[in-house]
Image: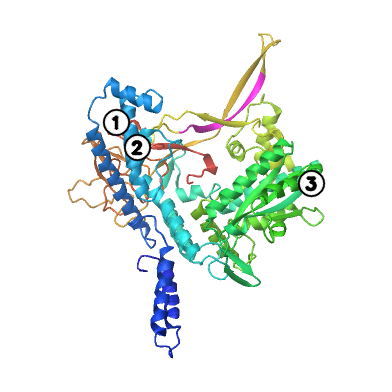
Amino acid sequence: MVAEIPRPWAARLLSAWEKRRASFNPLVTTGEGTARRIANEQLRANVAMLRPVNEALPLDASDTDLCNVAWDMAEKCRVKLLAIQAEQEHVPTAEFLDAVRAAIGVAVSPGGVDEFEQRARISAVCVSGGISPPEAARYEDQPAVRRMVAAHWWTGRLRKAHGKAKETAAINLGLVRRDRECYASSVSVLDRQWQNERNAATLAATIAKNIETEQEFTLAELAAKGPANAAIKRAELMTRINGFERIAIAAGHTGLFLTITCPSKMHRMKTQGARTVENGKWDGTTPDQAQKYLAKVWARIRASLARKQVSLYGFRIAEPQHDGTPHWHCLFFYEAKHDATVRATVRRYALAMDGDEPGAQEKRCDFKTMDPAKGTAAGYIAKYVAKNIDGYRLEKDLEGNDALETSARVEAWATRWRVRQFQQIGGPPVTVWRELRRVESVPSDAPDFVHAAHGAVNKIAVIEGRANASVAWDRYVAAQGGVSCGRNYRVRIAKAQSESIGRYGETGAPVIVGVEYFEVAKVRDAIGNWIDILPRTVTVESKRFTWEIMRPAASARAGYAARPVSGLDLGFKREHRAPWTCVNNCTGDGDGLQRAGGLRVENGGVLRGHGEWGHRRSGLEGEMCGEKDQGGTANATADDQTRGKAGNHGNHFAARGSRSNLTQ
């Protein structure tokens, strides 16, 4: 009964079963049998709460087991697709197409009818496998079908579903609580640790070569130069928060630190003094559902304040309470005259659900006015930022746990439930800020706001009068039009249409090439007289390099050499091995064979796919299921590989200069 659940949980359940079984009065004849029956019933009830994604994927399944199930489900979908295509080998008559048009209300083509039927019938396999099929509003029929027959897509979906099922089981068992496993279960924390180690090993073993400078770096070295680095992420957040506070002080705005908590029925546990007990009101709400509730509450607050012409700016931080239920910390700045309106609006919507329950008025909404005489707002919120990233300069959290352990558990909680921890409220977007840092210079005749924005995001001594002058978020916001600019910010991201075709047959998303701005230029004649004006959008390209992904280092895989061995020639012709990264730079060995994302392709047909463990074959597309893909290919033909257009990246891709972050 407990064989297919994680061992720590099985041990806890069996220990509880043994205590119940042994708790009987030996003087009562039926006492032992009654105690055993009660223990068995409770054990069955506890195990019944631990529901896996599907029967083939128990809660104690490893990532290897999960990938194997993904291969099986993709193959099942592929076989079903072939059967459907065999049934569809006919030419639809005009009467048939007219009937379909009458049924759905739009004209259809014969191919469209076939793809619609394929999608509808294969989606049933996804539902039976415990995951949702591709969203109808997001994907067309043909890309949706290609996803459902791809092991790579199944792997990603199953990982999400399996992780949530495992953490939901831990919450149902009452393991996630202050006095046991705070914020997230230890099983999920360990899974996340292993995942991070696998990703780190992959990045460290993969080399990127700069084509222009001939320099080589590991992907780990390049990733450390971007927001994927916890220190850089924390510093950037604090820079932006401090910039907003500078704006508020200069404008005389009020600062408010707000905490919004979910209703008691969304909490698995409750505290009674120093004790933590089960909450009898809990309705089964999971942390991701509670996060959606908070997002909806905030959407109503924001919309109501916008109707009242109240502008907010600041940051929102989502973090878990001891039982995994999220709550929000918000630092907002606004005009002092709107203080009463802001507080009343927040209380109205935050307490709309169960606002009359005991303690709701005092605990569900907590307001703290920022007082510059007592300290800065950025300094007050810094501990929340550090707690949710890396525990920087913290010793203990509010629950008395070590800061480093807390940050690891919070990070595991956020990734397990797909919770966005930090969100900027108001002001211009940070994407333009980051892209401006890749722009070496702007045109000399550009408007003043362009020069101001470019100078604000780069370390220029003249801004603050010292050689290590910091970047200035407040000056960047002013150059973009202020904290209330909304979507009308001045400097924008410039994008170019991508020519690449993704693994599922879709055109790649537009790629960022720099920044752009609108200006009204003066047109002058040959002698310099102003004769007309010319409205135009000017694009300034950012500095980018072309990178080539090299083969992994020799230590990455046993028996996998990054460089050829010299001085040893046995007369054999060595076969190219399938790459285990998402980018393949092999050009074939002259016999007509090309490779695409770990596949051997001959005359456009797939011969064999190689998984991470090398013991499974793919379906139609044969993706490797053990990778964290960055846009490689799986359905490319030999001609596509020759042209370098098989995937979202192909053999070369543009990176972001010295501040590149090549991982998600």
For label 3, the residue is 340
Q: Is residue 304 left or right of residue 606?
A: right
Counting from the top left corner in percent of width and height, residue 646 is at 35, 34
Q: Which mark is residue 119?
A: 2
Determine the residue located farthest toward the bottom in the rendered image: 27
Q: Is residue 50 left or right of residue 518?
A: left
Q: Which mark is residue 639?
A: 1
SS assignment at label 1? helix
Residue drawn at point x = 82 percent, y = 42 percent:
337
Cα–Cα span, label 3 and label 1: 66 Å
Q: Is residue 626 left or right of residue 483?
A: left
Residue drawn at point x = 66 percent, y = 9 percent:
525
Cα–Cα span, label 2 and label 3: 53 Å
Cα–Cα span, label 2 and label 1: 28 Å
Q: Is residue 229 visible?
A: no
Q: Quadrant of the N terminus?
A: bottom left
Magenta residues span 509-520
Counting from the top left corner in percent of width and height, residue 106 is at 40, 24
Q: Amino acid at mark 2?
A: Arg
Q: Which one is nearer the viewer's eye here, 565 or 127?
A: 127
Residue drawn at point x = 65 percent, y = 57 percent:
384
SS assignment at label 3? helix
Determine the residue located farthest toward the left in the rendered image: 571
**Image quadrant of residue 342?**
top right
Q: Specify the principal SS of the magenta part.
A: strand
Q: Residues within 10 Å of mark 1 (few under 14, many from 20)?
A: few
Q: Amino acid at mark 3?
A: Ala
Is 459 part of what is drawn in magenta? no
Q: Which one is nearer the viewer's eye here, 234 or 448?
A: 234
